[in-house]
Image (cartoon, helix red, strand yellow):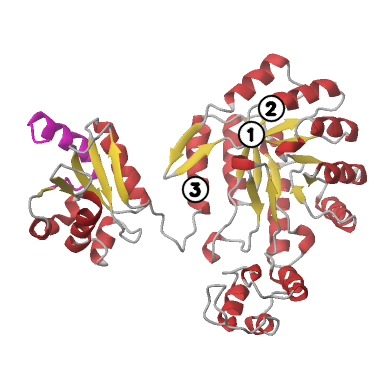
Amino acid sequence: MALTGIQIFKMTPKKNCKECGCPTCMAFSMKVAQGAMDISACPHMSEDALAQLSEATAPPMKTIKIGTGEHEYSLGGETVLYRHEKTFVSETRYAASVCSCMDDATVDAKLAAVADVDYDRIGEHMYTELVYVNYAKDTDASKYVEIVKKAAATGRTLVLGCKCPETAKAALEVCKDGKPVLNGADASNYEEMNKIATEAGVVLGVSGANLDELYDTTAALEKLGNKNLVLDVTMGTVKETFEAAVAVRRAAIKDGDRTCGYPSIVNVAALTEDKAMREALAALFTMKYGSIVVVGDMDYAMALPLYGLRQNLFTDPQKPMKVAPGIYPLNGADENSICLTTVDFALTYFLVSGELERSGVPCNLLISDAGGLSVLTAWAAGKLSSTSVSKFITEEVEGKIKSRKLIIPGKVAVLKGDIEAKLPGWEVIVAPLEAVQLVKFLKDMQANGQL
């Protein structure tokens, strides 16, 4: 059961030192109770109190880390069933898959295709993060190890789908430094798999023929001292898998059952061979509630809507998406290129910058701090004004840019006169109302020699 702020406060040192960033220990305790701060932020908490409170205030779903370096990912750590209640924490990660039942040419082609999806969307790098390497029963163990070597060479974090202890041990020898997931424990082998995963220092995936078996096996692993787990909730059918994914999350969040409080794996590639259905299921289990979703093959047709859904779902609804204020040169712009300005709301920035890039006209896009709001909202809130624009240009732009032509958003044309009054020597031009009109607008200006 979650502790109240008063219960937490009783265990604090009551120094009111402010080193945690809060004015008092009571304020700190209330934030910890709300989940807004971690108890470890207090530098003076006794070890005994820290041990007690860390367990009591930990998220109902444990945070598990996989991979290393730039390919290290956090899974789990969730505190709510629905995003609007607070926020979702750790993004779903997608895995392409290969299997020891495939011939060498097919394996090589699938692994080569892993790097095909690679693009940026609203400031986030989108690519296939994981590779699931499945060991098919009665196939050659040495072939599986070779496939694991090839998969590790892609630089992606691996998930080893292998229930044979000997084969799993051999596979880990060639990839354990990359901190993969060993997804191979079940009711028949969990003791051996636990020993192998623990010795290798990797996360252990647990599966079961049904939800009861999955729960019992997880509980048995916890008794052995292993809480570095993920739960493979993939069952025989889509319906059973969906029920299992939701039941595990609900038991952890609503019922406080720590045995269910682990990230989950959903292998949609094992549920259907139909590509369109795989994409639909990947979207479903991104929402309900896969931490790792194995999609089989990932291409742009699948990635563009799927990563867009994930980005929308895992954006904190309490925080606006912003880009950093600054000067963004586009199309090879230099200090003499014309300037445009807009707000720091990420969606506005990427829509505008995309159209500017499409025009091919060299220009400098100036982004000032508008609180992460859209153009009209920022203007109405006083975050986008002649004062804020002129101040930013005076302090951050004039010393770096020689051009004295500035294009402002068409929806705030009313600011033109005030900006010109506050920026002597600058010519202020009003852009069209919609970003999509910028291409023709700039090309026409270029043709007329206005740039």
Q: Is residue 33 left or right of residue 179?
A: left
Query: Given this view, does label 2 or label 3 mark the residue nearer the observer?
Result: 2
Q: Is residue 242 visible?
A: no
Q: Quadrant of the N terminus?
A: bottom right
Q: Is residue 169 above or below residue 257?
A: above
Position of residue 311 relative to residue 33, above or below, is above
Distance (Cα) linking label 2 and label 1:
7 Å
Assign a secondary structure to mark 2: helix
The amino acid marked with disc number 3 is Gln
Which corner quadrant holds the C terminus?
top left
Q: How many marks?
A: 3
Which callout, 3 or 1, points to the residue nearer the camera? 1
Give the quadrant of residue 369: bottom left
Circle 2 packing at 10 Å, graded few (<14), some (14-19), many (20+), is many
Q: Which residue is mark 1?
A: 156
Foreground: 7 or 140? Answer: 7
Mark 2 and mark 3 lie on one chain; the one further toward the N terminus is 2
What's the residue type where badge 2 is placed? Ala
Residue at the (69%, 85%) spot, across then down: 10
- Pointer 1 local density, CA inside 10 Å: few below 14, some 14–19, many at least 20: many
Question: Which amino acid type is shown beneath numbered disc 1?
Answer: Arg
Choose top left, top right, bottom left or bottom right for residue 61: bottom right
- The residue segment tinted magenta is 430-451
Residue topped by disc 3: 311
The residue nearer to you, when weighing 131 against 24, is: 24
Is residue 5 highlighted in magenta?
Answer: no
The image shows residue 149 at horizontal and vertical percentages of 73, 25
Residue identified by numbered label 2: 151
